[in-house]
Image (cartoon, grey):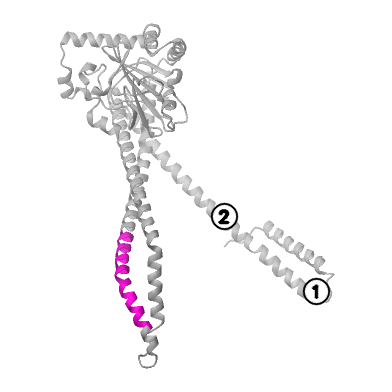
Amino acid sequence: MDAGSPSENAIIQKGRAAIILDHRSALGSMHGASLAAVVTFCSSLAAQTAAPLPEQKAQELSTHQLELRGVQDTLDQSAEQGRKIETEIESIKTDRAKLTEALVETTQRVSALEDKIGETEKRLDTMTGSEDAIRHSLEGRRAVIAEVLAALQRMGRRPPPALFVAPEDMLQAIRTSMLLGAVVPQMRAETESLAADLTDLLAVRKSIAAERDQLAHDMANIRADRQRLAALIEARQTALSAAEQALGAERERAAELAKHASSLKDLIARMETEVTAAARGAEAARKADEARKASGSEGRQKLAGGIFKDPSRLAPASAFVETKGMLPLPVTGNLLRGFGASDGFGGTEKGLLIGTRTEAVVASPCDGWVAYAGAYRSYGQLLIINAGQGYYIVLAGMERINVNVGQFILGGEPVAVMGDGSTKTAASIAIGAAQPILYVEFRKDGAAIDPGPWWVKPELQKVRG
C-alpha cells in the first residue's frame, strides 16, 4: 500500500495532537486518574482513527481507476466501430445501388434482431414465472419437511434403551418407531418431490442465465447495427440533399401547408400541387403508371423473377395492386388495434395500431415517393408515401423521419425511428399504452382502405402475436 503524501501525514499528526489535547483537558479534572494512562489511551485512540484513512483513500482510488478503464475500453470499442463504418460507407456512398442495398440489408438485420430480442424476453418471462412457481412449491412444504427431519435428528441423539434395564423406555421407543413407520413413506415421497423441484429449479436458473447472456449479446449486436444504419442513412441523405437551401425552403412550405390542411386528403392534395419536390414525386408516379399500362400488366411475374429486390430501380417494380399478399410490415411489434375495430370514441379505426420497441426502426413497406414528411396535428411525425395508382401509405407516431419530400424509396428501406413512448399522439392516447405506437393507414383515391390483403401472411400472424 502506498504511503500518504507529506501533506496528508502532517494533517494526520495534527489530528492526533488535537485529539490528545482535547482528551487531556476533558480528563484533567478527574481525581486519582493517571495522566500517563490518559495520554496512552488518547494516543491509541488517535492512531486507530487516523490509520484507516490512507487505506480507504487508496481503495477508492483503485475503484475509480477500474471504472475509468472500463469506460475508456467502451469508448475505444465504439470509436473503432465508428471508424470501420466510415471506411465502409466511404467505399460505397458514390454507388447508389450499393448504398441502398446496404440500407435494406441492415434494416432487415435490425428487424430480425428486434424479433429475436422480443422472443428472448418472452421466454425469460415464462422461465421467471416457472422459477417463482417452483419456489412457492418448496416454501409450501418447508414446514412438513422440517418437522420430519427434526424427529429423525432427535432419534439420532437418543439411541434405543437397553431392553432389560429400562423396559418402559423401550416400550416408548417401539411406539415412536410405529409412528415413524407411518410417517417415513410420506416423508420419502416429499423428499423425492423436493429433489425433483430442486432439479427443475437448477435447470430453469441455468436456462435463464443462458437466455440473459444471449439477450446481452443480441443487444450489443443491435446497437452496432443501429450505429451502422444511422451512418448509412446520413450518407444517403447527404448525397440526395445537394441543394440544402432549397430543401430547407420546401420543408418550411410543407410545415405551413400542414397547419392549414383540414384532413390527410387535403394535405396530400396541397403538397402535390404547391410543393415542388412533392409535385415531382407525384409526376414521377403518374409517368410510372402510364409506362406500366403501355407495356402491359406483368408486375406479379416480375416480382416473382426477383426485380422487386433490385436496389438500382428508380420506379416501383410493379403496380401496387399487384403486391397484395407480398408486403412486409413496416415495423416489428404487437397489433394493438386492427382496421375496422372500435376507436373508443364511437367510430372505427381507419388503420392499424402497432406497439413497438423503443427506438424500433420503421421501414417502408413498398416502393414509392415521399409525399409528406413532418409533424401533423395529433399524429406526431407523419410520413405519407405515394405508391402510385392513387394508393398512399400513411405512417405516423415516429420520433424521427429520415427521408425527404419527393425522395423515391424502396420497400424495406429505413424511413423513420420510433421514440420511447413519452411523446403522446392521438393513437397512444386512444390506446392508453406507455410504449411507442406506430399508426399505419392505406388510402386509395382519398379514402382509407383495409391493408390486410397486402401483408405477407406470416408477417401478419407475427404482429398479432
Task: Tell me: residue 195, above or below residue 306.
Answer: below
Residue nearest the observer in this picture, 321 or 126: 126
Task: For the C terminus, give its image quadrant.
Answer: top left
In the rendering, which numbered label is found on residue 35? 1
**Residue at (27%, 17%) from the top-left corner?**
314
The stretch of residues the image draws in magenta is 172-199
Where is residue 215, by image quadrant? top left
Where is residue 368, by image quadrant? top left
| Residue extending farthest top | 273
Count numbered badges in the picture. 2
Which amino acid type is shown beneath numbered disc 1? Leu
Judge left or right: residue 136 versus residue 391: right
Where is residue 42, by image quadrant? bottom right
Q: Gap between marks 1 and 2, in whole Å?
A: 39 Å
* In magenta stretch: residue 124: no
Which amino acid type is shown beneath numbered disc 2? Glu
Instruction: Name the spot of residue 87 as percent of width and height, x first.
Output: 36, 33
**Residue at (74%, 72%) from the top-left corner?**
40
* In magenta stretch: residue 181: yes
Task: For the N terminus, give its image quadrant.
Answer: bottom right
